Image: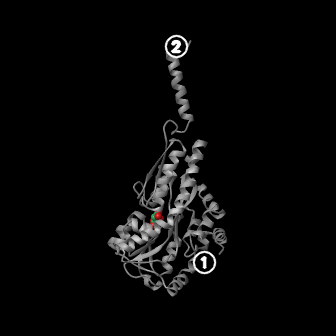
């Protein structure tokens, strides 16, 4: 006989069974913690905010995206670990930060002068080579969703950087990429890997002499206030892969995932449409601020940089992988 008590117990058991069968987040909103290291007012910061807005709209509020900028939650190295552990669900690390994860192929993006401009770069990020690279993350429990642009890097220090010899002995902060290490060594500098969140202070206190970054990062971290000289070298590219914890992504209800994919696709178009302008504006603002003297390379100086940095391509070929280099060079027509 079914008494009130056994009915109650049955209802409880059913609820428990349901809650065990369904993903842990099913009762409430699905939370996506999106951690990044740059300021909100940068190409990546703005694109993350755009994704938040679109993701929430396209999933009819089923998803709540929480964006944590400026290394608030995690610094460079920790954020990768946090993603793999599921402590955050989404990141957009620079392509120069995948080496420590064991996916060194992404360092192809760091090769000096490999992309003439944004158009050349997009042939990779929006083509087969880009897809092939993102697929390499799956083994690490990570799914690559998109590439977001930042821009071309300028070099800065407290002394003029006109020719390669000007780098001799300078301590230069780099991201955790062996290609960037080789780049600085080729210029005669001493590379020092450091988390992005620590760069301003390191420049201010003289722990390092200089660094490289696109203007948007330099300006929004106020690095121009502690760097007297910068050279508009555009010697290399900095961009991002937007990545998610694969288990989390695969476990989403299909309709939610579809909404998020649509949001990501539109946020990516947005990111890539604003990146150049954001960098141009940041450069103008730094020029107006007047704390840094900006140098345009002469033809001869540029030729000297290209010559000094050319050996990095061969030196790093084994590390990056011949297939990856070939795929990228074929895409850009090089
Ligand atoms: C850096 O560490 O210099 C950049 O990767 C920061 C960023 O995410 O743009």
Could you tell me which residue is drawn at 56 percent across and 62 percent down?
A: 102
- According to the picture, the residue beneath numbered tag 2 turns out to be 3
Residue 308, image x, y percentages: 53, 83
Q: In which image quadrant can residue 292 be found?
A: bottom left
Say which label, 2 or 1, has the lower sequence index: 2
Which image quadrant: the C terminus?
bottom right
Nearer to the camera, 292 or 144: 292
State left or right for residue 117 relative to residue 222: right
Q: Is residue 140 visible?
A: no
Question: Mark 2: is the Cβ under 8 angstroms from ligand 1?
Answer: no
Q: Quadrant of the N terminus?
A: top right
Q: Nearer the viewer, residue 25 or 234?
A: 234
User: Residue 64 appears at what percent x and percent y?
Assistant: 48, 45
Tell me the residue that label 1 is attached to. Answer: 314
Report helix, strand or loop for mark 1: helix
List x then y, in percent, for residue 48.
48, 55
């Amino acid at each position: 006989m079914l008494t009130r008590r056994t009915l109650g117990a049955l209802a409880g058991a059913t609820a428990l069974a349901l809650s065990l069968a369904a993903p842990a987040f099913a009762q409430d909103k699905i939370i996506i913690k999106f951690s990044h290291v740059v300021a909100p007012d940068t190409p990546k910061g703005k694109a993350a905010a755009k994704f938040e807005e679109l993701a929430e709209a396209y999933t009819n509020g089923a998803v709540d995206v929480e964006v944590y900028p400026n290394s608030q939650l995690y610094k460079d190295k920790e954020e990768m670990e946090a993603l793999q552990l599921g402590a955050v669900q989404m990141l957009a690390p620079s392509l120069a930060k995948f080496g420590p994860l064991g996916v060194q192929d992404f360092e192809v993006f760091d090769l000096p002068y490999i992309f003439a401009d944004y158009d050349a770069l997009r042939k990779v990020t929006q083509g087969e080579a880009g897809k092939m690279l993102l697929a390499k993350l799956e083994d690490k429990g990570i799914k690559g969703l998109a590439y977001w642009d930042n821009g071309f890097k300028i070099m800065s220090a407290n002394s003029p950087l006109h020719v390669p010899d000007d780098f001799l002995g300078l301590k230069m902060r780099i991201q955790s990429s062996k290609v960037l290490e080789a780049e600085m060594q080729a210029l005669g500098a001493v590379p020092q890997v450091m988390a992005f969140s620590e760069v301003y202070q390191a420049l201010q206190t003289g722990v390092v002499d200089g660094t490289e970054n696109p203007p948007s990062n330099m300006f929004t971290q106020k690095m121009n206030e502690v760097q007297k000289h910068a050279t508009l070298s555009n010697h290399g590219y900095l961009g991002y892969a937007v990545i998610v914890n694969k288990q989390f992504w695969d476990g989403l209800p299909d309709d939610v995932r579809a909404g998020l994919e649509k949001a990501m696709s539109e946020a990516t178009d947005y990111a890539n449409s604003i990146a150049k302008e954001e960098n141009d504006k940041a450069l103008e603002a730094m020029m107006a601020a007047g704390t840094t003297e900006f140098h345009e390379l002469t033809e001869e100086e540029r030729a000297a940089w290209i010559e000094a940095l050319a050996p990095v391509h061969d030196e790093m070929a084994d590390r990056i992988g011949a297939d990856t280099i070939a795929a990228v060079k074929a895409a850009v027509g090089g």
